[in-house]
Image (cartoon, helix red, strand yellow):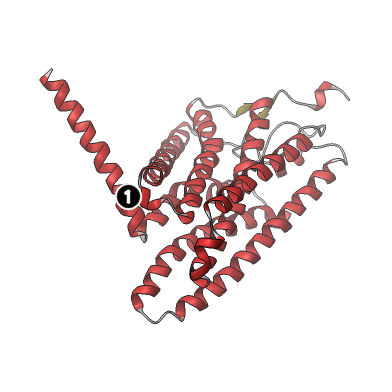
Amino acid sequence: MSNSSFPTVFLLLPFADTRQLQLLQFGLFLGIYLAALLGNGLILTAIACDHRLHTPMYFFLLNLALIDLGTITTTVPKAMANSLWDTRSISYTGCATQVFTFALFLTAEIYLLTIMAYDRYVAICKPLHYRTIMTSRTCVNMAAAVWVSTFLYAVLHTANTFTLPLCQGNALDQFFCEIPQILKLSCSHAYLREVGLLMLSVLIAFGCFVFLVLSYVQIFRAVLRIPSEQGQHKAFSTCLPHLAVVSLFISTAFFAYLKPPFTSSSSLNLLLAVLYSVVPPAVNPLIYSMRNKELKEAVWKVMTGCFSEAIYYLSSADHS
């Protein structure tokens, strides 16, 4: 097998051809990226510092914030750099790194959202047994299982994808290195092995989706049986944000990977990729904090604390 079957660089799909639109895209992505960093960073700090939030639900939300930071950092900075410097290239090693980290965080998010649905199911449908079922050890074991299994999954897909010889050029029809787009460049029937693994992954993801739907059917049936409006409101305030995040992420990701080939176009590929890889990490903190009073108070406490410290240091510097 010749070395020419493995390109040294890949060419990513640009968002725009004109310089003005490239700079506009850079500014837009910069704003989204900073919003994601700020929102998820505040959630991480609030949950870590506020002892009232040391519960299973917020422990899993902390992991979700880490995943969202990883997901958006995998794709957006490189896209911003390419737009700013008017280039399309990404190195072979950089592409492999993107494939690995994106597969890791994308799969981890699906698994974690499923676990979070189970946590809400136990909390609302089996409240008397919640503390015995969702113990600290159980939660840590669940999170560890997610990270270990997704790490092995990402290693498998990355190794399998980048051992395929490529003879259809080096231009990818996406703004980051995505496995289906790399498979289009393959000139070996061995790519069917990776397609089979992807289909297995889709089936697992579909199984998680079915579990999520069944969990929320049981949850809403239980919530509607709660006699007090205050109890219903509290239950909905913890479930609806999670359901909104699940709907946004899974619907766009499923459509991106399962859409018929004849509907595929560069603009549609870009739009779907942004919807499932860039938008959720930026809006998830807002969705979770909007209806959650405890989290909103903890985030506000972190923000006011940081602001007070900044004022104190500035005033100390002026006096000195």
- Give, as a three-letter code, the residue at label 1: Ala
Residue positioned 40% across, 65% down in the render: 237
Whether residue 266 is visible, yes or no, is no
Residue in front for this viewpoint, 183 or 230: 230
Q: Is residue 141 left or right of residue 289?
A: right
Residue in front for this viewpoint, 265 or 118: 118
Instruction: Point out the residue furthest to the left here.
Output: 319
Q: Residues within 10 Å of mark 1 (few under 14, many from 20)?
A: many
Residue 45 figure quarter = top left
Q: Which residue has dot 1 on it? A: 298
Residue positioned 64% across, 57% down in the render: 254
Q: Is residue 7 above or below residue 195?
A: above
Numbered circles on residues, count: 1
Instruction: Point out the residue furthest to the top here.
Output: 320
Residue positioned 48% across, 34% down in the render: 22
Residue 165 figure quarter = top right
User: Dot 1 lies on which element?
Assistant: helix
Residue positioned 37% across, 71% down in the render: 233
Instruction: Point out the residue furthest to the front here.
Output: 132
Q: Position of residue 314 (x, y in %)?
A: 18, 26
Residue in front for this viewpoint, 169 or 235: 235
* Image quadrant occupied by the C terminus: top left
Whether residue 239 is visible, yes or no, is yes
Q: Is residue 296 left or right of residue 278?
A: left
* Image quadrant occupied by the N terminus: top right
Residue in front for this viewpoint, 281 or 305: 305
Q: Position of residue 200 (x, y in %)?
A: 77, 53
Q: Is residue 142 left or right of residue 179?
A: left
